[in-house]
Image (cartoon, grey):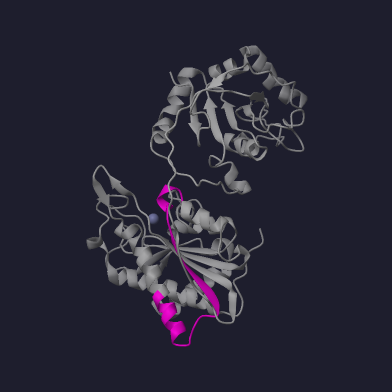
Amino acid sequence: MRDFIGFGISPFTTPTAADPVFLGFGIETARYNDYASQPDVRGKDVLVLQGEPTDGRGHYLLSGSSQESSWGSGYRKAALARDKGARSVVVITFAGTTQFEAMGAPITEELAEPAFALAAPVPQDERTLAETPPEGISLYITSFDLGLAMLGAKVEALQNYVLSSYSTGKPPKPLQPVPFTFSIPQKQEAITSENVLGLLEGTTKKDELVVISAHYDHLGTQHDTIYNGADDDGSGTSAVLALAQAFAQAKAAGQGPQRSLLFLLNTGEEKGLLGSEYYTSHPVVPLQSTIADLNIDMVGRTDPRHNSKSEYVYVIGSDRLSPELHALNEAANKRYTHLKLDYKYNEPNDPEQLYTRSDHYNFAKHRIPVIFYTSGLHQDYHKATDDVEQIEFDKLEQRARLVFYTAWDLANRPRRPAVMVK
Ligand SMILES: [Zn+2]
């Protein structure tokens, strides 16, 4: 029987007495505040209910409409409890044990794989709060039956709680959890890794920075098979090195760029964009002075949507934060490289959501304009067959040249590209 699913680093690797406190739906807004009567949850294990107050017929108290709020997300509740200093969060679902087991099976399978996270969590923005498990707190999701047991409550008591939270519009008197013990063993290992940075100082605007990035990690070895990742992202790593060489050569010849350039090779991209997450929370030049990130990930192949004669590159994200950046990339291509710029994966509703899937995304989260260059997914993607024999070096070069011309313009244009107001 499986009654809970855990996310994050377990503080309960040996049996530990819980210090539970029930916080209703775990919501804190001006309209509805579960923390009003129990504001201090430091060091405690916070128990909250799934979802938000509703009449059960699709009407939500917080929005006053049929629109669910982001408080429907257990992740968001957990992030709030973390910010208030809680030790762990238990989200009690309304799923019976059998239903919970069925629901949890695929997640449990995924969680059985080793997970990686930064040792020190970084703050999340409002939008991602509801979408990803927060770092820096352990989160447990339980079946209804286990939740009832932790609360020492009868079904009716919990039903009344939920009904009256909606009908009265405010949190009812909290239920009192019973004493219990956590025992959640977990194999934990600290791993050190490095980003590789090369800074080329600019001439007249050296305090402003253009980042050119790729990731140098890949999948490593699996079942004695080496995953070389020639395209993902050996191609981008090589392109960044070639650009570093070109800019350094220009500088040596007395034609150095006005703004500074950071050549950033990230680690841990395949483990959840960790290297760029670390960099953007520990930047070597303040993020306010970072004018753009040009990220190169998989640029050495031809994908099934194009034929071998096609000279193309997918451009993703260029117009999301700065139409000016989008325009200058197009101008550089028109003037120099003449590639077909394919915007398929830039469509906001594209199912692949590539915009969120490489290192530039961590820059975009900080509202730094980005361009993600890629030649797209292919049959060897994340397979042991992603090898150097498959790389089309002439195409890799063309694409790297476009990044170069765009970077050159960014580094030398009089004004940095304007960022759209939110
Ligand atoms: Zn990649």
| Depicted 277 relative to depicted 331: above or below | above
Residue 95 x %, y %: 53, 22
Residue 302 higher or lower than 53, as above or below = below
The residue range painted magenta reads 245-273
Q: Which of 372 and 2 is in front in this view?
A: 2
Whole-percent x and y of residue 339?
38, 72
Residue 312 magenta = no
- Magenta-colored stretch includes residue 249: yes
Q: In this view, does 221 lie to the left or right of 277?
A: left
Observer able to see residue 163: yes
Work out whether residue 68 can be spotted.
Answer: no
Quarter of the figure with the N terminus: top left
Specify the quadrant of the image occupied by residue 375: bottom left
Quarter of the figure that contains the C terminus: bottom right
Give the image quadrant in which the ligand numbered 1 is located: bottom left
In this view, 111 is above or below 92: below
The answer to which of 64 and 179 lies nearer the viewer is 179
Q: State the residue at coordinates (37%, 69%).
A: 239
Q: Give coordinates of residue 150: x percent, y percent.
A: 59, 18
